[in-house]
Image: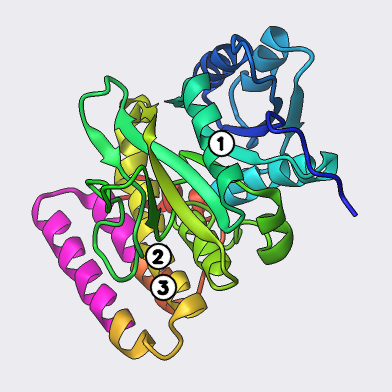
């Protein structure tokens, strides 16, 4: 029988893809913590720049996992999660490299996780990089709502139950991964965390937001071209996978509804002259309906360059 980990044991998984500056900044913040000394698992997702060399130069003693191919958010983080689970049963935090969270807020999240064995996942309120705007107070079902990020806390208490915790900053109980499995790599990017939280909820684990904790996400750090093509493609396509996984009886309503939404978006983008984004939406629709999942970055980028 596994022994219970000390209260401050923690593993943090940070995914890097062509963004060494973000990763180095993120790690530097963590290594300056005074009370927590987490094990860091940096996963490079087959970067095509000098990320690996730069990260190794700055942090030669940290765990650096180098993927031979881009495995997406799901597959990349799974490499780090597996490594963390092999070391024991301490909580695992997923942390975007363009996000920031203070040690005091992580301690708050750890305390909340320990207070209730039914909590599988806990996250903070997520604000923009300047702390001026609330980006998410947890998430809700992405196929039952157009906007899945909650724009305000769903309760007045300090700890609020939500349908999922955004993967930007997510603290997870290790036993949840052992019970329900890791992130579904067919999503590649987007909705895989909502899927994980949904699977966990079906066996009794709660996903919660602690309103007393804060984290910050600098959305502007990513090129707009990625948001207009890759991001929109996976968001459109992955709703079909989510429906397949959880709503086999509801597909006759949900699939037509999201297809109609996608067609309307495609038409709007075409009329605005945003041809690359329109192509991404169209490919997301076709692939979702056909069941073509997994990573499609190269194929999509080749397609949008030709328009």
Q: Please determine whether, in this image, residue 215 is positioned above or below residue 27.
A: below
Residue 16 appears in which quarter of the rendering?
A: top right
Disc 2: which residue: 237
**Residue occupying the point 55% across, 54% down:** 119
Question: What secondary structure characterizes most of the magenta part?
Answer: helix
Identify the residue at image location x=55%, y=21%. Answer: 23
Instruction: Tell me, yes or no, whether the highlighted magenta stretch contains residue 265.
Output: yes
Asked if labels 2 and 3 touch by Cβ distance under 8 angstroms, the answer is yes
Q: Which residues are magenta?
A: 255-282
User: Which mark lies nearer to you, 3 or 1?
Assistant: 1
Q: What secondary structure is found at the residue carrying circle 3?
A: helix
Q: Earlier in the sequence, mark 2 or mark 1?
A: 1
Disc 3 designates what residue? 240
Q: Secondary structure at mark 2?
A: helix
Badge 3 density bin: few <14, some 14–19, many ≥20, Cα 10 Å: many
Front-most of 276 and 46?
A: 46
In the structure shown, which secondary structural element does the residue marked by tag 1 occupy?
Answer: helix
Task: Classify 233 as above or below 112.
Answer: below
Q: Residue furthest right?
A: 1
Position in image of residue 238 (x %, y %) = 43, 64
Q: Is residue 165 visible?
A: no
Residue behind mark 1: 111
| Quadrant that contains the N terminus | bottom right
The reply to whether the magenta stretch includes residue 52 is no
Is 76 in front, or is 69? 76
Q: Is residue 204 above or below residue 94?
A: below
* Residue that appears at 59% across and 23% down: 49
């Amino acid at each position: 029988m596994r022994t219970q980990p000390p209260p401050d044991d923690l593993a943090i998984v940070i995914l890097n893809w062509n963004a060494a500056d973000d990763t180095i900044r993120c790690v530097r913040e963590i290594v300056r913590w005074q009370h927590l000394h987490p094990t860091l698992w940096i996963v490079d997702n087959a970067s095509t720049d000098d990320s690996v060399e730069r990260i190794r130069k700055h942090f030669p003693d940290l765990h650096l996992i180098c993927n031979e191919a881009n495995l997406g958010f799901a597959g990349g983080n799974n490499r780090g999660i597996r490594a963390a689970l092999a070391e024991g049963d301490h909580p695992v935090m997923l942390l975007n490299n363009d996000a920031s969270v203070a040690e005091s807020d992580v301690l708050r999240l750890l305390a909340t996780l320990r207070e209730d064995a039914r909590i599988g996942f806990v996250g903070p309120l997520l604000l923009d990089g300047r702390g001026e705007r609330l980006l998410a107070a947890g998430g809700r079902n992405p196929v039952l709502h157009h906007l899945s990020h909650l724009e305000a806390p769903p309760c007045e208490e300090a700890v609020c139950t939500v349908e999922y915790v955004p993967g930007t900053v997510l603290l997870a109980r290790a036993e949840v991964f052992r019970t329900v499995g890791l992130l579904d790599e067919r999503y590649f990017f987007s909705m895989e965390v909502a899927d994980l939280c949904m699977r966990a909820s079906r066996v009794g684990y709660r996903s919660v937001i602690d309103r007393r904790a804060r984290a910050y996400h600098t959305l502007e750090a990513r090129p707009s071209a990625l948001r207009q093509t890759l991001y929109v493609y996976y968001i459109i396509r992955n709703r079909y996978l989510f429906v397949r996984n959880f709503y086999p009886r509801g597909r006759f309503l949900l699939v037509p509804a999201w297809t109609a939404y996608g067609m309307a978006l495609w038409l709007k983008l075409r009329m605005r002259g945003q041809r690359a984004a329109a192509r991404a939406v169209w490919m997301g629709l076709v692939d979702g309906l056909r069941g073509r999942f997994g990573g499609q970055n190269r194929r999509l980028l080749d397609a949008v360059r030709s328009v």
